[in-house]
Amino acid sequence: MSNVFYRSRKSYPVAVRAEGVFIEDAQGRRYLDGSSGALVANIGHGRSEVAQAMAAQAGQLAFVHGSQFSSDVLETYAARLADFLTLPNYRFWAVSGGSEANESAIKLARQYHVERGETGRYKIVTRVPSYHGASLGALAASGMGARREVYAPLMREEAWPKLPKPDPALSGEEDAERLRAVLEAAGPETVAAFICEPVVGASDAALAPNPGYHARIAKICQEYGVLFIADEVMSGMGRCGEPLAVRLGGDVTPDLVVLGKGLAAGYAPLAGLMASPAVYDTVMNGSGAFKHGFTYAGHPVSVAAGLSVLDIVEREGLPQAAQARGKQLLAGLETLRGRHPQVLSVRGQGLLLGMVLGDPATGEAYAQPGLAERVAAAAREEGLLTYPGSGAVDGTRGDHLLLGPPLSITPDEAELLLGALDRALVRVGQHIPV
Ligand SMILES: Cc1ncc(COP(=O)(O)O)c(C=O)c1O
């Protein structure tokens, strides 16, 4: 009997080593990591340079508490990150995971308004579908019915007004204008912030609005005195071909930018938020402290991992690599769509790619989810790891597959990925899920 509390009853292979885009299990099976875990392993696995940087940091200074000390590595990293992201004078708040980072953003937005005397602002407008994390605040912000349902009694729905997902039929500006109606209905003087994923991740594989959307969102937020939070936990750090996906369709600078996953690319738990000088100064010149904190915030070993990962991302030009490999993979996915009628559409930005699956007869989602899980299981049999999801249509209906290999994937490895996915789709065939 195992003492491990697993995520589900299914049995998990035991991973023993990983290198580049491949993970090997205890049986000696190799898997191509087509989803970087959950879009995490941006620089690929097994980089000894990162391991050495972490070991050196652990040997010198493994831990200090944020209420007592700063560290050189944290100062250096925050400056390098602000530079990489072109967010001059922004302040980096370091935490251990994307959910903690979004909790921090939500609380900071609320405190910012309280410091300014606008104590009536507390609502956070979010989108449906969306995923911002598993902790209760981040989950409350998430428009993902299935993950929220059990915990709904613990949430006050009225505090989380919802904007519909981006509509590709509208221009970016028209699409963003729909935020105005949501703000008016909620009472703009009660809204603290609007949060969205610039390119949607787990809840609606790689859905992106048309160009101009985020610039108009930022303008509307400013008009109403509402902070704009870009959740770039999945889309940021080069995954979509640019340091920040929010800037793909035009120059935008959100008030708060939330980061995670690719920051330390899985080598250590590291996430955080970048806060604008206006937000930081308001809090520091007001009560003088952010009323929030986590024990492991700014952990020196995690930050050392982040710094070493950033060295590699910059040195190897991984955002540009993501653009090139993204084009190759998207073209390959288009070919698969032509061969497999259950693939309704494919889309993507850089190496955040999505495949929408459904009923070829109607071109719509099946009534029950399950197809994406079947394709992912078949892909695993073919030695390919993917990230299946469901519920994008109405919380239940909708099947999709998220793909996002390490940004360091080679052209040949990208072809291997496409070949395995093709064979997986053949295996599943026209099987209609029950
Ligand atoms: C956009 C986005 N935000 C937040 C999170 C939560 O991050 P974590 O699982 O590290 O808490 C995720 C995780 O998938 C995510 O995709």
Image (cartoon, helix red, strand yellow):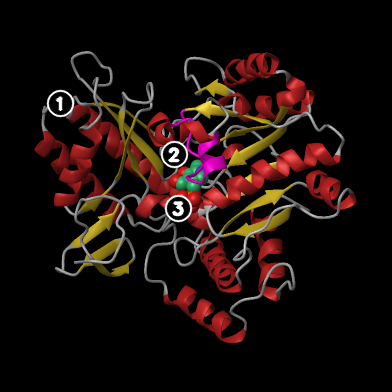
The CB of the residue at mark 2 lies under 8 Å from ligand 1? yes
Gap in angstroms between the C-alphas marked 1 and 3: 40 Å
- Residue farthest along the front direction in this orientation: 153
Viewed as shown, does residue 390 lie left or right of 218? left
**Residue at 59% across, 66% down:** 296
Mark 1 and mark 3 in contact? Answer it, CB < 8 Å: no
Q: Amino acid at mark 2?
A: Gly
Q: Is residue 225 left or right of residue 35?
A: right
| Residue shown at the point (14%, 68%) measured from the top left | 27
Residue 129 at least partly seen: yes
Question: Pointer 1: what residue?
Answer: 434
Q: Is 136 a magenta residue?
A: yes
329 or 291: which is nearer to us?
291
Question: Residue beneath label 3, please?
Answer: 321
Q: Earlier in the sequence, mark 1 or mark 2?
A: 2
Seen at 18% across and 70% down, the residue is 26
Residue where numbered disc 2 is placed: 201
Disc on the earlier residue, 2 or 3: 2
Q: Is mark 3 within 8 Å of ligand 1?
A: no
Tell me which segment is drawn in magenta. 129-144
State how far apart marks 2 and 3 are (Cα). Answer: 20 Å
Q: Position of residue 115 (x, y in %)?
A: 84, 41
Look at label 3 and name its amino acid.
Answer: Ala
Q: Amino acid at mark 1?
A: Val
Q: Position of residue 175 (x, y in %)?
A: 57, 18
